[in-house]
Amino acid sequence: TMTITIELAPDKREQLAREAERMGTNVEELLARIAEEYLARSAAVDSAATYLLQKNAELYRRLAQ
């Protein structure tokens, strides 16, 4: 695991605390979930882009001529 310290404006800290409470968790867990979801989504987008580029490589080559 990794410990990260971030500075947030008071209003953002309050928003995070309210959202965490609404979700039945704490701020640390909420931020960990957000980070995990972001990384999963980012990996999925990268994978889809790679697939499309490979699938359409011949088309792109022809269009570039």
Image (cartoon, rainbow, N blue to C red):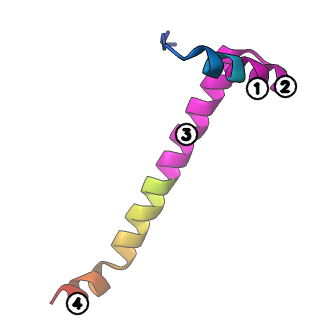
Disc 1: which residue: 19
**Mark 4 residue type:** Arg
User: Would you say residue 30 sits in the magenta stretch?
Assistant: yes
Q: Mark 3: which amino acid?
A: Tyr
> In the image, what residue type sits under mark 1?
Glu
How far is mark 4 from mark 3, CA to CA? 35 Å
Which residue is at a point 82% across and 27% down the rendered structure image?
23
The percent coordinates of residue 8 (x first, y second) are 53, 17
Report, in whole angstroms, how far the alpha carbon at label 3 lies from the one at label 1.
17 Å
Residue 22 image label: 2
Q: Nearer the viewer, mark 3 or mark 1?
A: 1
Q: Is residue 23 left or right of residue 47?
A: right
| Nearest to N terminus: mark 4 or mark 2 | 2
Q: Is residue 49 above or below residue 63?
A: above
The mark closer to the camera, 4 or 2, is 2
Discs 4/1, front: 1
For residue 50, what is the image quadrant?
bottom left
Q: Which residues are magenta?
A: 16-44
Residue at image location 55% in from the left, 42% down from the top: 40
In terms of secondary structure, where does tag 1 sit?
A: helix
- Asked if the stretch drawn in magenta spans residue 9, the answer is no
Residue on which the image places disc 4? 62
Q: Are marks 3 and 2 in contact (CB under 8 Å)?
A: no
Q: Identify the mark at residue 32; answer none if there is no mark.
A: none
CB atoms of marks 3 and 1 within 8 Å? no
Determine crowd level at label 4: few under 14, some 14-19, many 20+ residues with C-alpha closer than 10 A: few
Distance from Cα at disc 4 to Cα at disc 2:
53 Å
Q: Nearer the viewer, residue 11 or 7?
A: 11
Q: Which residue is mark 3?
A: 38
Task: Kindly check if marks 1 and 2 are in contact, taking CB atoms under 8 A apart as contact.
Answer: yes
Q: Residues within 10 Å of mark 1 (few under 14, many from 20)?
A: some
Sequence-wise first label, 4 or 3: 3
